[in-house]
Image: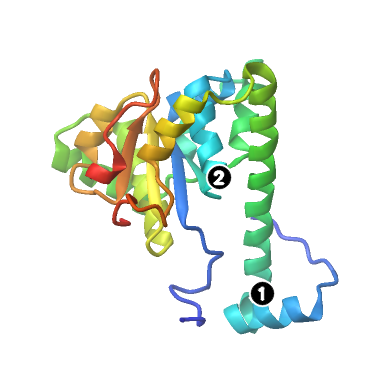
Amino acid sequence: MARAPRRGRARVRVTDLLVLDADGVSKAASNDRTVQAWLERARELDADLVLSAVTLAELVHGRPRDAAVSRVVKAAEVIPADEQLARTAGKLLGSSGSDATIGALVGATALAAQARQDAARCVLLTSDPADFGALLADHPEVHIVGCDGPATGPATADR
Amino acid sequence: MAVTKVSMSLDTDVLAQTRERVGGRGVSAYVNEAVRRQLRRDALADLLAEMQAANGPVDDQLIEEVRRLWPGRHDADAPASG
């Protein structure tokens, strides 16, 4: 077993990641039952929750609702959109022909979070699985699942 | 990120094992990351408690469906990890 720091330093090991997009966070903030089930599953698996900083820009607008969003944000790691991540997002846009810049930044965030943890499984919960499926078509390491209505989206086993 | 130097006590074996894993210089970063992760876990527990207070427990059928889509690593039908 490797114990020497890799890529600069040893990280706390995480085996599962759950990335939420703005809809996922918004639904969590309003106690949506489907998202509640996904979060319960995250706890069962001791998964780490991940958000993009861009998602905060979509949701935190200096209004009373911010408090409900913030209790979700506190449970997650917020990954900043730096130059490297933005470049990855740009490549996702280029390869998919999509113009969903925010989605690409969220997708790049999922890729970055997954790449930091050797062999971590990464699930991206969104109300827009089709758009993310196009953006991340070349990245089966991110499993995209839908949060609209009863659990929907492609089974991770099929990806 | 602003950092504050603190003096704290750790169990001797915890410190020894941490040093063994991350090396002498990586201890603060590792402890910091571990505490951050535990804070997120605790916040998730708080959030889930609030959701459960509002909704009641998750419907059995729904959680089973989520477990099928996101199986445990050791479940027979777990997908190859990415």
Q: Mark 1 lies on which chain?
A: B
Q: Tell me, yes or no, if residue B53 can be seen here.
A: yes
Q: What element carries label 1?
A: helix
**Viewer-proximal residue, A38 or A22?**
A38
Callout 1 environment at 10 Å: few (<14), some (14 to 19), or many (20+)? some
Tag 2: residue type? Answer: Glu
Rendered position, B70 above or below B10:
above
Q: Which residue is tagged 2?
A: A44
Q: Which residue is drawn at 46% across and 43% down?
A: A18
Q: Where is residue B14 in the image (x, y as percent from the top left)?
A: 73, 76
Helix or strand or loop: what does disc 2 sit on? helix
In the displayed structure, does residue A32 sit left or right of residue B37? left
Q: In which quarter of the image is residue A69?
A: top right
Name the residue nearer the viewer: B70 or A19: B70
Residue A152 higher or lower than B15, as above or below: above
Q: What residue lies at 62% left-to-right and 18% top-to-bottom?
A: B55
**Residue A57 at least partly seen:** no
* Direction from residue B4 to residue A54 in the image, left or right: left
Residue at the image point whose x is 16% and y is 38% from the top: A96
Q: In which quarter of the image is the C terminus of chain A?
A: top left
The residue identified by callout 1 is B27
